[in-house]
Amino acid sequence: MTPYLTRQKHAEERLGTALQQMNDAIRDVHKSGIDVDISTLTMHTPRGPMVQVDLKTYRAYGASPVLRLVEE
């Protein structure tokens, strides 16, 4: 396997692991009574658009966000 394909494979594996961990964390937060708002942000790069995820958590009854992972 070429170094480029090896790098792509490793990146895909990391993304899969990160997605699983994020879903587990969202599940745990939801069980604790905190709502999660997930939105996407599009960053423009030389290769074209790159989508990133933004997470906000809200305590019950519409309180202010308690978590922001991506700065605006």
Image (cartoon, rainbow, N blue to C red):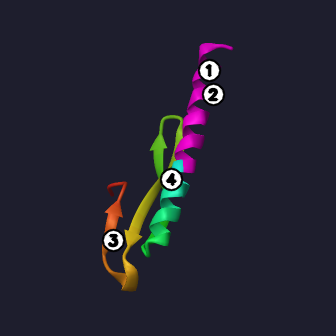
When the figure is inspected, residue 61 is found, relative to residue 33, above or below; the finding is below
Q: Residue 19 placed where, x, y %? A: 56, 48
Residue 5 in sight here: yes
Look at 32% across and 80% down and name the residue there: 63
Residue furthest to the right: 1
Q: Quadrant of the C terminus?
A: bottom left
Q: Secondary structure at mark 3?
A: strand
Residue type at mark 3: give it.
Pro
When the figure is inspected, residue 62 is found, relative to residue 23, above or below; the finding is below
> Which residue is label 2 attached to?
9
Look at 56% across and 42% down and name the residue there: 17
Disc 4 and disc 3 in contact, CB within 8 angstroms: no
- Provide the residue span drawn in magenta: 1-20
Residue type at mark 1: give it.
Thr
Q: Residues within 10 Å of mark 3 (few under 14, many from 20)?
A: some
Residue type at mark 4: give it.
Met
> Which residue is label 4 attached to?
22
> Which residue is label 1 attached to?
6
Q: Residues within 10 Å of mark 2 (few under 14, many from 20)?
A: few
Disc 4 and disc 1 in contact, CB within 8 angstroms: no
Query: Mark 4 vs mark 1: which is more N-terminal?
Result: 1
- Between circles 4 and 3, the one closer to the viewer is 4
Residue type at mark 2: give it.
Lys
Q: Quadrant of the N terminus?
A: top right
Q: Secondary structure at mark 2?
A: helix
> Which residue is label 3 attached to?
65
Q: CA distance from mark 4 to mark 2?
A: 20 Å
